[in-house]
Image: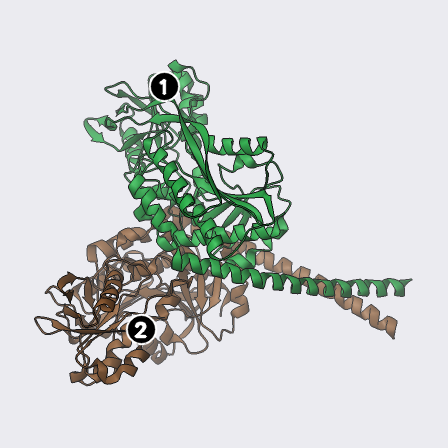
Chain colours: A green, B brown
Amino acid sequence: MKIFFLAISLFLVLISCTDVKSQKNIVETVNKTDSTTIKHIFNSALSNGQCYQWLDVLSNDIGGRLSGSPEAQQAVEWGEKLMTDLDFDKVWLQPIMVPHWVRGKKEEASFIVNNTKINVPICALGGSIATLENGITGEVIEVKSLEEAESLGEKLRGKIVFFNRPFDDTLIRTFRAYGGCVDQRYAGAMVTGKFGALGVIVRSMTNNIDDYPHTGTMSYGDLPENEKVPTAAISTKASNLLSEKLKENPNLNFYFKQNCKTLPEAPSFNVIGEITGSAIPEKFIVVGGHLDSWDIGDGAHDDGAGIVQSIEVARLLKLNGIKPNHTIRVVLFMNEENGLRGGKKYAEEAKINNEYHAAALESDSGGFTPRGFSFDKNEKNHELFMSWKSLLAPYGLHDLNIGGSGADIGPLNDGAISLFGYRPDSQRYFDYHHAETDTFDKVNKRELELGAASMTSLVYLLDKYLE
Amino acid sequence: MKIFFLAISLFLVLISCTDVKSQKNIVETVNKTDSTTIKHIFNSALSNGQCYQWLDVLSNDIGGRLSGSPEAQQAVEWGEKLMTDLDFDKVWLQPIMVPHWVRGKKEEASFIVNNTKINVPICALGGSIATLENGITGEVIEVKSLEEAESLGEKLRGKIVFFNRPFDDTLIRTFRAYGGCVDQRYAGAMVTGKFGALGVIVRSMTNNIDDYPHTGTMSYGDLPENEKVPTAAISTKASNLLSEKLKENPNLNFYFKQNCKTLPEAPSFNVIGEITGSAIPEKFIVVGGHLDSWDIGDGAHDDGAGIVQSIEVARLLKLNGIKPNHTIRVVLFMNEENGLRGGKKYAEEAKINNEYHAAALESDSGGFTPRGFSFDKNEKNHELFMSWKSLLAPYGLHDLNIGGSGADIGPLNDGAISLFGYRPDSQRYFDYHHAETDTFDKVNKRELELGAASMTSLVYLLDKYLE
């Protein structure tokens, strides 16, 4: 029995070795075809890319395109025309209604009143109400968290609450630092309005210590009208200065003025372009970004980059003679920044029409040099995706991690779909994010093109290996 | 016998499994200490870095610092003072003689003469002679390689030879594209002067299509004085335009004027700072970059970044309480750009003094986001270095490849030393390299600091694991 056991054991060991070896051969054959195709994709993106020129038009000719604005409408028309000109099999507009917040035309202003007046850069947060026409002035209470503000309760009455928790610079991925701070911007007014605060100012969401205020969406939650207070971001330099001055004089005043308001909801559109699948056209793979941007920059990185890269994916597939099995849908989502109406609508319609979506990929982390992809948890195809590591590594795509995909494609998550986010290098992203510095000149042509090629390569693999 | 064989086989299989497991445990324990230390290094670099502020001074207060210039001397004094102020155990200047080429104060100019005059951006290459005082004018022969120029022979007489082979944009690492073109800049005059060419113009060494000429070193080799011709770089846009115009009119003329000259060699210095080793002070690890730069930008990326990162390595080691076994030498090499006198001198002196150098690391690829390290071939410690991959990967340092280190540390190569080059992302490097656009504002603070932390981590590992 012992001998038999030993013999069987050794047999099993040998068998498993052989098995591994033959599997390895198969994988290597597959990879060789795929690696050649991916090399062609990158070659064509880098030598014959068009996305950078498209981004020039979207950023410089159209510019900032907040939901409901004339520029957002121009961007819709531009996207529809571009995909039509590129001979997509089908291009259409998907109607939605979007929030329509405007900054107002009059100047925004703010200063610290402490013996002398010190002007500081400020901008209203998206969704905020205006101040009184001549602005508001009040003493400042500096806090570092929503919890701290809550705990102060009635002490906030009549005060301007100053949320000043900075980014954690030691986090290598800057999105994590953003994630650790952005609650102050989003919910600062929500938690303080009920205590009778006069207004809210928030440290800008960036690692950089500079003079640019960064806007972004905020919410009043369920607060009644009389508890809503004007809310704005001040630059990080201004935040550091104000904090210093408060140490010298806790009773100093802060003044700010803004003219923003929320208008009735406006009609707008997702823009959708399709390459019909050759084998399973009834199954879809989505690639997209968001067409809207904030108003104070030209939205080149956020998310003009994702828009032009997504369109480039379809062009590069065609250019390289790749006929996808699935139907590839390029979706230019509207209203990611302050409502997510586009993402929600797309998913709703997909459900109503009983459409099967195999995968979706979003690019909404800027047009920087490639680092990898992240994908949503609960993946049935985890091993398959990880097996692509060696195919993607030669292009700097080393990070293939679980962890989020994109806001616009999130509503498609039915537990079955594979959701991916393109992850470029994040070091410079929050220098520009939601600030007037998010402009075309901050985008490097090769980095943008490498991103488009990275995304095309992933879509190629998803289309080939997913059902 | 069969039974015995089977039993032995199984025993061996089981033993080898156990062995792998216990080895793995050892590796994991070692890695845990190292990964904690490396995390601390990165934390301190990102939250308390100083290299960005130093680079501001070197770039903006001192500026471009070509060998032999007053700015190069200022940079020497700045480096010596900084390392002294940082309490290095020893700081000294190592005297060298350097080539002293100057661009001259009068304007450089060039235009295409084709019905009308079209001005194009130009700059003299380092080492070139001047044109006649009023410039030179001649017909243009466009070539794509040194070989093509050679093959034209006597046809070059009296002509301006235009080297116009562009970067290969499909190469992911832009240094490879540079490597595939730079012979035109370095040796264009060398191969054409003997045929009586009137002058040489070279397409700028960059992927970018823009208006900035990129200078760089050139050589006449052994040509006699009467065969040396003025040599300059024109911008890539100008190169494309000239090439187009030549297709319309092969007899068009090109004019250029430059006032550069080579003065007698000048005295200068390598600047060296030392942290004395705690265990084996007689063994050295060098970390460095080059202090000189070209004259037309402020040399922030090339190689101000490498200089301040190298000094930061020593500061971060001290700040984190790491007492190196080896003596760590920070070397600010002079004259990498047009002579390599600093690198050669350092190696010469090391040999004379019979110094043992365990390793050297150079940063001379810009202050961009980390990608990894390359190291010279013939490495006895290849496996050791590769075992650090998982320690470095969390910081974006995935590329750990054989392939060159740095020009300044190259002369130290005695077959025994381990030579490393820091390799940041290369996509933007040649946008700025040797052009007036290589300025401080092109450097991102976090990217620079991540580089310094990457280098510190490698020096920590080299110090710990090498003899």
Residue A439 at x, y percent in the picture: 31, 43
**Amino acid type for the residue under numbered disc 1:** Ala
Q: Nearer the viewer, residue A1 or A372?
A: A372
Which chain letter matches label 1? A
Which chain letter matches label 2? B
* Residue at numbered disc 2: B144
Residue B389 at x, y percent in the picture: 52, 60
* Residue at numbered disc 1: A197
Residue B105 visible within the image: yes
Relative placement, left or right, of B108 versus B186 is left
* A355 vs B102: above or below: above
* B462 vs B396: above or below: below
**Amino acid type for the residue under numbered disc 2:** Lys
Residue A358 visible within the image: no
Residue B44 at x, y percent in the picture: 41, 49
Q: Nearer the viewer, residue B304 or A104?
A: A104
- What is the crowding at mark 2: few (fewer than 14 residues within 10 Å), some, or many (at least 20)? some
